[in-house]
Image (spheres, coloured by chain):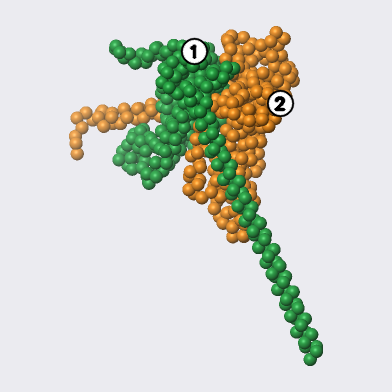
Chain colours: A green, B orange
Amino acid sequence: MLFVRNLLRDIKLMVNDKKAEIKNNLTRIRSLITKHKRHDHIFAGVGMFIIISLTITLLVLFLDLVFDGYPRFNLDFLTNFPSRRATAAGILSAWVGSALVLIVTFFAAVPLGIAAGVYLEEYAKKNWFSDLIEINVTNLAGVPSIIYGLLALGLFVYGFGLGQTILTAGLTLALLMLPIVIVATREAIRAIPIHIREAAYAVGATKWQVSLHHVIQYSYGGILTGVIIGMARAIGETAPVITIGALTFIAFLPPSPVGLEPPFINFEWLEAGFTVLPIQMFNWISRPQMAFHVNAAATGAIIILLTLLMNGLAIKIRYNIRKKIKW
Amino acid sequence: MAKLENPEVSPRLAKNLRRNILERCIEFGLLCSGIFAIFITLAIIYVLVSEAIPFFQHVSLYDFLTDTVWTPNYSIKHYGIMALVSGTLTTTFIALLVAVPLGTITAIYLSEFATHKVRETIKPVLELLVGVPTVVFGYFALMLVTPLLQKIYPDLTTFNMLGPGIVMGIMIVPYIASVAEDAMRAVPMAMREGAYAMGATRFQTAIKVITPAAISGIIAAYILAISRAVGETMIVAIAAGQQPNFTFNPVESAATITAYIVSVALGDLEHGGIGYQSIFAAGLTLLLMTLMFNIIGHAVRKKFAERY
């Protein structure tokens, strides 16, 4: 009797031990899980925090420019030439210069970029030569912008004798913008399904007709996005334009591209000296007087507003395309 | 069946012939635009090398690489590129110190943690940050960050490498984040599901499964960041001072290669003079540095590339 009772007691103890052990293990595992879940939450918090601070940084940067430059936000600032008196100085020559340079950039980079993109996607056979072009485009996108400035200085300014003109600056920025347009064009074209092309070929279209009437038409939105992003980058680009020797103090306007008498359009402005918005801003930052820093801030606010608007537009267009097009 | 009036020159074939010739011409035109990319690369190399050759006839390559003083505009001229390289490397290093952790965490967060909605909202914001012109970031470094740093460390001079380095880092974060995120999102879903099925948390999956699988893309992002930082011009030209100084101390002012080119270009440039040639020699050094980083990056990527 006693033996059996002892045995039962031992078994009970053993079972209890086992239970305790299981329970113990369970709490251990639970605490481990809680710990790892906590890591999850901590990381998510850190990630969110970093992203929010980045966004706030962008906002602070913009608001700081707006507040610093606030005294200059009036029409005079847009219609005055730079001056030795900070309060009377304006950005007329700078924004006109920027606009004219961008016109040249647009007409040089966009046709060339789209043509190269179409060639690589629609025409090029898969061989070492198209690989070579592709590697070149990728590498060009990674070359520091100031190197393009040096290229333009050696080639356009002195090699071709174009001088330090709007034409030179426009072509320089076009070189910078070219890879962006090519890459955007290729991505847009790649998204077009093959049966669109097959349908066109089936009714007897030539390769060029397919490319022009269908491929380029349907990739229009994607190309436009790339063009706008490239232009936004060209507006803010400073280093290459300084390198080709753009002037920092310009108190005259280039000849007007549009005349009142025939032939209405002239191209003298291409050969005019110029300055652009970011160079004007750089010039004002470099001066020791605080009053000029106000001008710099106001110019910065305008530049950043322009680039944000353009980039925002590009993002919006891309979003709309994604939503609209269902092949 | 239509009867042909002149069986020798069919009008239909003539039309086709014209059409085919036009097609060939167009194809050739498009090919030329493609070749233009190769032309630009060759032109860059040609211009930099041809202008740097007269420079190196004047200055020996040994002096160029070992001298630590860069004073082309003084009466006693020294051409030691290391004075500029030190500035470039220091600012780049500070920028990477800021950008690599922030960018990587952002990428992991966006790829593995964020909901679809959060990701779709944040990616455009990051793209906007990429679009901010560097001259504005330069203003930011000089007027906002450096004064802020001076409150913490009062001995800091107005021009220093720390402020611009930090701002450059902030500028680069979106580049790293977006490229690294693309790489992580390219990792097949099955790998994530496998990890989750074994009871791994999101964090464990991200660190132990996704990051190693995407490592070659993440390294590509870092290389892109280094190239950006090395070639960045306006931030350092504005906020780091333009005085060449052989130092790796971030609180001192110094010039980078890019800042030197800008400072020379701002002055009167005598075409063909030694000052003019020196910026091409500096530019060539810069190009070789970015090229070197790209080659190293390519090799590292190849070594770590995972197949799945």
Do callouts 1 and 2 mark residues in contact (Cβ within 8 Å)?
no
> Chain under label 1?
A
Query: Is any part of residue A234 visible from this angle?
Result: no
Which quadrant would the N terminus of chain B be assigned to in this image?
A: top left
Label 1 Cα crowd, 10 Å radius (few <14 / some 14-19 / many 20+): some
Marks 1/2 same chain = no
Give the farthest residue toward the bottom: A1
Residue A83 tag number: 1
Q: Position of residue B219 (x, y in %)?
A: 62, 39
Residue A140 location (% of width, % of height): 54, 28
Q: Residues within 10 Å of mark 2 (few under 14, many from 20)?
A: few
Which x, y percent locates residue A76?
A: 42, 18
Please give the name of the residue rendered at 62% of the width and 56% of the height, measured from the top-left corner: A37
Between residues B24 and A57, which one lies in front from this camera angle?
A57
**Taking B203 as reference, is A72 left or right?**
left
Q: Name which residue type carries label 2.
A: Asp
| Residue drawn at point x = 51 percent, y = 31 percent | A63
Kindly indicate the quadrant of the structure image that contains residue B235. top right
The residue most toward the front is A71
Occupied quadrant, residue B158: top right
Left/right placement of residue A291 relative to residue A187 reads: right
Pointer 2 residue: B155
Mark identifier at residue B203: none
In this rendering, the count of numbered labels is 2
| Kind of residue sitting beneath label 1 | Ser
Determine whether, in the image, residue A108 is placed left or right of residue B154: left
